[in-house]
Image (cartoon, grey):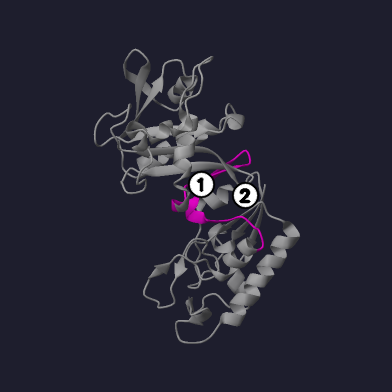
């Protein structure tokens, strides 16, 4: 996989203060991938260190009042030239930067206020069809599959993947898609992102989301207590059995541990082949009924 990254993320001392934004997940991309590093500001002729800059009314302005818009635009164009020549599969950029921020950047007031707009280089790359992601949303790249955090604008995906997660025994007719509108299923996706345990990772192949794992504290079939997040996971049929589900589960368990949770739970039908995968990532059966196992994993 060919990946373009902000040079500061790779440990290069090109940050405005002369430092770097070394990112271990980005550094891991150097193994097994073709990585190209770029720094738009330096490529535009600005030194490191330099006075910090933000975009104010469409013009890049340094904190001391100097206009540095031309340098930022030059750097952005040079990055685009490299991208057109190298054709990276993915571009991983420094969040909130006036050059590299993908989802957000600072608003130009130098008060730490963020707005939902991209930096100059990120915007130019995306306008020209290149896939860009903020480094903080990157989880890993597994066998060419990008695993990243869900964007808030993608919450509707949860309803679609919830339907795919419904276990249908062999020979049984699939239910109508509106089954996910039932109250006991709506709690998996309604107002997702509003709770402290609402976390979601997606697996993306060739720009399409092919798998999703998400957690929240809810009174679902796998509910244990109000401190334990419940799991839901689903993959597009074509991508099942390739280890992607296992990676999603392990990455989510690591994220929950990082967030301070002590355990996680799930419910799974006894006939579901996924029981083995859940055991492999650390879940144990703690209870059961006629149809389902209740499983827990200590973090």
Picture coordinates of residue 249, whole percent (x, y): 46, 34
Between 215 and 42, which is closer to the camera in this rendering? 215
Q: Residue at x 32, y 49 (%)?
A: 194
C-alpha span from label 1 to label 2: 17 Å
Q: Image point 58% across, 26% down: which residue?
A: 241
Within the image, what quadrant is residue 219 found in?
top left
- Residue 44 visible in the snapshot: no
Q: Is residue 276 left or right of residue 113?
A: right
Q: Position of residue 146 (x, y in %)?
A: 57, 44
Q: How far from the left and from the top, in percent, is residue 3?
A: 64, 53
Report if residue 134 lies within the magenta region.
Answer: yes
Mark sitting earlier along the chain (1/2): 2
Is 173 magenta? The answer is: no
As drawn, the residue found furthest toward the right would be 85
Q: Are marks 1 and 2 in contact (CB under 8 Å)?
A: no
Mark 1 lies on residue: 148
Q: Residues within 10 Å of mark 2 (few under 14, many from 20)?
A: some
**Residues rendered magenta in the picture:** 128-152
Given the current orientation, which residue lies at the most extreme top position? 290
Above or below: residue 231 compared with residue 14 = above
């Amino acid at each position: 996989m060919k990946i373009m990254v902000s040079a500061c993320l790779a440990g290069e001392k090109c940050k405005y203060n002369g430092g770097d934004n070394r990112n271990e997940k980005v550094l891991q991309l150097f193994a097994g991938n073709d990585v190209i590093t770029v720094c738009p500001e330096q490529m535009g002729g600005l030194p490191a260190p330099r006075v910090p800059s933000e975009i104010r009314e469409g013009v890049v302005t340094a904190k001391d009042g100097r206009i540095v818009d031309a340098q930022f635009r030059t750097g952005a164009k040079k990055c685009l030239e490299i991208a057109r020549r190298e054709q990276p599969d993915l571009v991983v950029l420094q969040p909130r930067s006036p050059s590299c921020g993908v989802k957000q950047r600072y608003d130009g007031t130098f008060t730490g206020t963020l707005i939902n707009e991209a930096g100059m280089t990120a915007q130019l790359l995306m306008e020209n069809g290149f896939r860009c992601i903020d480094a903080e949303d990157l989880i890993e790249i597994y066998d060419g599959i990008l695993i990243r955090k869900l964007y808030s604008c993608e919450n509707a995906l949860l309803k679609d993947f919830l339907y795919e997660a419904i276990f249908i025994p062999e020979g049984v007719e699939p239910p109508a898609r509106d089954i996910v509108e039932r109250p006991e299923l709506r709690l998996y996706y309604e107002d997702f992102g509003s709770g402290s345990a609402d976390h979601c990772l997606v697996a993306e192949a060739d720009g399409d989301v092919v798998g999703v794992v998400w957690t929240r504290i809810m009174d679902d079939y796998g509910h244990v207590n109000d401190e334990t997040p419940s799991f839901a996971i689903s993959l597009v049929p074509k991508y099942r059995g390739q280890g992607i589900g296992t990676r999603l589960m392990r990455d989510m368990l690591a994220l929950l541990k990082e967030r301070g949770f002590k355990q996680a739970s799930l419910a799974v039908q006894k006939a579901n082949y996924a029981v083995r995968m859940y055991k492999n990532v650390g879940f144990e059966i703690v209870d059961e009924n006629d149809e389902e196992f209740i499983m827990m994993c200590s973090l």
